[in-house]
Amino acid sequence: MSDLPAKPPLRVWKLPPMWGAPSPSPFVVKLETWLRMANVPYEVAHLRRPPRSKTGKIPYVTLPSGEVLSDSSLIIERLSADREIDLDAGLDAHQRAVGHAVRRMVEEGMYFIGLYERWVGVGYAHSARDYFAYLPAPLRFVLPKLIHARMRRATHGQGVGRLSDEERLSKAEADIAAIAAILGDNDYILGPRPSNVDATVFGFAWTMSSNPYASSPGDAIKSDARMRRYFDRMKARYWNEWTPADG
């Protein structure tokens, strides 16, 4: 037996669990779900300071070598290449294209609806109270106001912030209806086996449907029987042991 110390496992840096989800960030839950799908061992570390990633965002990971990777999609691409993991193996070109389109719709469309609701609209009071509750004053009072102003500008520039509540709801319902139609009677988004797109859809479904306020995408997910069954199936398969205290 070697006397060399074991390398630390891959470490995922994130905010602590909140609102009944492993993280308030859909990108964190996406990454953790992918790691579980790919059977990649990891540990979590809860941030008590600003992120040290090059993007200044979460999630980011520390590899056993000490290298830091950021951006959930880039992390997945790197780990897939380094460890020869292909969760899309067996999918044809059309299925891969559908998965790509769904990921883009969720991450670059529906995401901004959730972002607006959480930091500008109906959810702001909850976010301001809960996101940084672990920080000392005055940071836990100052940071929410800074994020609120930044997200108001970002969502206005993206366009979602210029819409009415009814228009945002209509867009969210259309996105969820499209995903549910692609899902159909399948167990997973693209067929009988889970693939990369499932990590994204499930991560967003969990965080958005656990919001403690009326959420356009979250309410659309909860009102669709196919999406509810899909969510329950993914959670039972990959997160059956998790409780909010686990992180």
Image: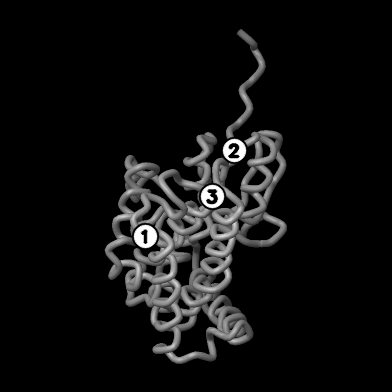
* Numbered badge on residue 246: none
Secondary element type, mark 2: strand
Give residue 39's position: percent from left, percent from top: 50, 35
Q: Residue at x 58, y 86 (%)?
A: 159
Left or right? Give the position of 13 relative to 19. Answer: right
Q: Is residue 196 above or below residue 173?
A: above
Give residue 109's position: percent from left, percent from top: 54, 74
CA–CA distance in space, label 2 to label 3:
19 Å
Q: Quadrant of residue 189?
A: bottom left
Question: Within 10 Å of the Cα at label 3, are there few (<14), some (14-19), or many (20+) other Cα atoms?
Answer: many
From this viewpoint, which residue is outermost toward the top? 1
What amino acid type should be assigned to the residue bearing mark 1?
Gly
* Between discs 3 and 1, the one toward the N terminus: 1
CA–CA distance in space, label 1 to label 2:
35 Å
Q: Quadrant of residue 175?
A: bottom left
Q: Do the residues labelled 2 and 3 touch (CB within 8 Å)?
A: no
**Circle 3 residue:** 196
* Between discs 2 and 3, the one toward the N terminus: 2
* Numbered badge on residue 184: 1
* Between discs 1 and 2, the one toward the N terminus: 2
CA–CA distance in space, label 3 to label 1:
18 Å
**Circle 2 residue:** 10
Q: Marks 1 and 2: which is nearer the front?
A: 1
What amino acid type should be assigned to the residue bearing mark 3?
Asn
Secondary element type, mark 1: loop
Q: Are marks 1 and 2 in contact (CB under 8 Å)?
A: no
Left or right? Give the position of 69 relative to 237. Answer: right
Q: Marks 2 and 3: which is nearer the front?
A: 3
Question: Within 10 Å of the Cα at label 1, are there few (<14), some (14-19), or many (20+) other Cα atoms?
Answer: some
